[in-house]
Image (spheres, rainbow, N blue to C red):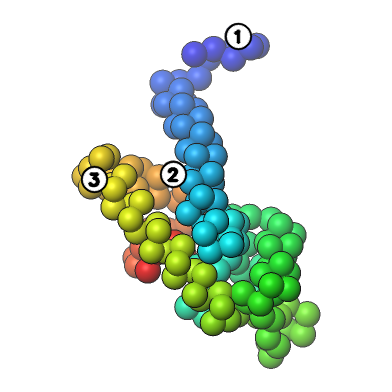
């Protein structure tokens, strides 16, 4: 594969570039699927991510953004809507006056459980088609890529923010 300027990548660079294209395409497909799964609960993929992040406990908007690799401003807009619609609430953060904690409400937890039930059915079905062994290998490769890009050490306890618990 050749760049427009005529310079070639290494075979490993070509393979990574192809992976990136697949990941970008997969991201779009997963977002659309997530929106479909979240729609019966009146939510979107973006709202689902935020709800899932604060399900186990409160977090600041900046912490939610870091967990997903998103811009704090985009998470702030989603969080504000979730608070306005009473799926979450802001609580005082004793460690920081301006960075309030975002906490899921009972209404938000009900919506999240509805989404997670739909996601389990979808994941079980698609996981069966693709196969557990291939998915594990893909997970390992993607985790290594994330660590290589971010310079992080391997996680010992799995992903920080599981979509479905």
Circle on res. 145: 2
| Mark 3 or mark 2, whichever is nearer to me | 3
| Mark closer to the chain start, 3 or 2 | 3
SS of the residue under disc 2: helix
Taking the spot 46% from the left edge, 26% from the top edge, the residue there is 18
Q: CA distance from mark 1 to mark 3?
A: 43 Å
Across and down, in percent, residue 158 comes to 36, 63
Looking at the rendered structure, which numbered label has been put on residue 128? 3
From this viewpoint, which residue is outermost toward the bottom?
94
Q: Left or right of 67: which side holds 99?
A: right
Residue 137 visible in image: no
Image quadrant holding the C terminus, namely bottom left
Residue located farthest toward the right when viewing the structure as drawn: 98
Q: Which residue is mark 1?
A: 6
Nearest the eye: 126 or 65: 126
Spot the residue most to the top. 6
The local crowd at label 2, few if under 14, some if 14 to 19, many if 20 or more residues have their Cα within 10 Å, is few
Element class at badge 3 = helix
**Residue in the image at 46% along x and 23% along y:** 14
Q: Does residue 91 appear in the picture of this structure? A: yes
x and y, in percent, of residue 94 in the image: 69, 90
Please tell me which residue lies in front, 111 or 52.
111
Which of the 4 image quadrants contains residue 105?
A: bottom right
Instruction: Find numbered disc 1 in the image and state the secondary structure of the residue it sits on.
Output: loop
- Are the residues tagged 2 and 1 within 8 Å (C-beta)? no
For residue 114, above or below residue 11: below
Gap in angstroms between the C-alphas marked 3 and 2: 25 Å
The answer to whether residue 28 is above or below residue 74 is above
């Amino acid at each position: 594969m050749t760049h427009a300027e005529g310079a070639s990548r290494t075979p490993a660079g070509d393979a990574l570039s192809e992976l990136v294209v697949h990941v970008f395409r997969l991201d779009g497909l997963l977002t659309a699927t997530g929106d479909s799964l979240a729609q019966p609960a009146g939510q979107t993929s973006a709202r689902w991510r935020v709800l899932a992040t604060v399900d186990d406990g409160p977090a600041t908007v900046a912490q939610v953004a870091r967990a997903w690799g998103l811009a704090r401003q985009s998470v702030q807009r989603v969080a504000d809507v979730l608070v306005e619609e009473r799926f979450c609430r802001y609580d005082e953060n004793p460690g920081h006056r301006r960075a309030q904690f975002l906490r899921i409400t009972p209404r938000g937890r009900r919506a999240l459980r509805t989404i997670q039930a739909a996601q389990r059915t979808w994941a079980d079905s698609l996981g069966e088609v693709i196969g557990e062994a291939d998915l594990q290998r893909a997970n390992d490769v993607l985790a290594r890529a994330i660590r290589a890009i971010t310079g992080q050490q391997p996680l010992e306890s799995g992903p920080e923010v599981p979509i479905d618990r």
